[in-house]
Amino acid sequence: MMKKQPLNSPNHSPEALALQLAQARNNERLRCAGVISARLDALAAFISSQRLEWYDAAELLRQEASHIDNQAQELH
């Protein structure tokens, strides 16, 4: 069980909280970048293995962009 710290603790200073928030945001950005990178790699592998024409590959990328946009809107 985590021990609670008093509110006047140095770990609850505005600077410490701002740093924790910045770290959390950076961690989330890194996680999202990893997910998107893996998805793009999978799409590239699919395009290559299926030897898709440029217009089919472009359509696949448009569909993925739409999917990502829809997921982002669900979060807001």
Image: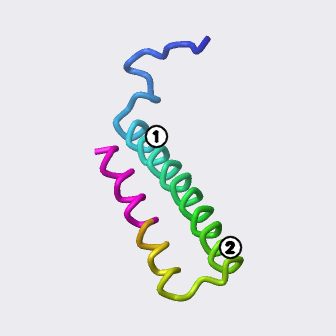
In reply to whether residue 39 is colored magenta, the answer given is: no
* Residue 10 position (above or below residue 34): above
Asked which secondary structure carries label 1, the reply is: helix
Inspect the image, locate mark 1, and give the three-letter code of the amino acid beneath it: Gln
Which span is picked out in magenta? Answer: 64-76
Question: Which residue occupies the extreme right position in the image?
Answer: 49
Q: Which quarter of the figure has residue 1? A: top right
Q: Nearer the viewer, residue 38 or 53?
A: 53
The quarter of the image holding the C terminus is top left
Residue 62 percent coordinates (x, y): 41, 72
Residue at 47 percent of width and 86 percent of height: 55
Q: Which residue is mark 1?
A: 20
Left or right: 53 in relation to 7: right
Residue drawn at 56 percent across, 87 percent down: 53
For label 1, the crowd category at 10 Å Cα-Cα, with few meaning under 14, some 14 to 19 and many 20 or more, is few
Provide the residue designation for mark 2: 45
Count of numbered tags = 2
Relative to 41, residue 25 above or below: above
Vertical arrangement, residue 67 with respect to residue 28, above or below: below
Residue at coordinates 58% horizontally, 62% vertically from top-left? 39
Residue 19 at x, y percent in the picture:
44, 44
Q: Main secondary structure of the magenta part?
A: helix
CB atoms at circles 1 and 2 under 8 Å apart?
A: no
Amino acid type at circle 2 is: Ala
Distance from disc 1 to disc 2, alpha carbons, whole Å, reads 38 Å
Q: Residue at left 37%, top 63%?
A: 66
Residue nearest the viewer, comparing 43 with 36: 43
Residue 71 % position (x, y): 39, 51
Q: Please state which of the two labelled residues, at mark 1 or mark 2, is closer to the viewer.
A: 2
Q: Earlier in the sequence, mark 1 or mark 2?
A: 1
- Which type of secondary structure does the marked residue at label 2 adopt? helix
Q: Is residue 47 above or below residue 16?
A: below
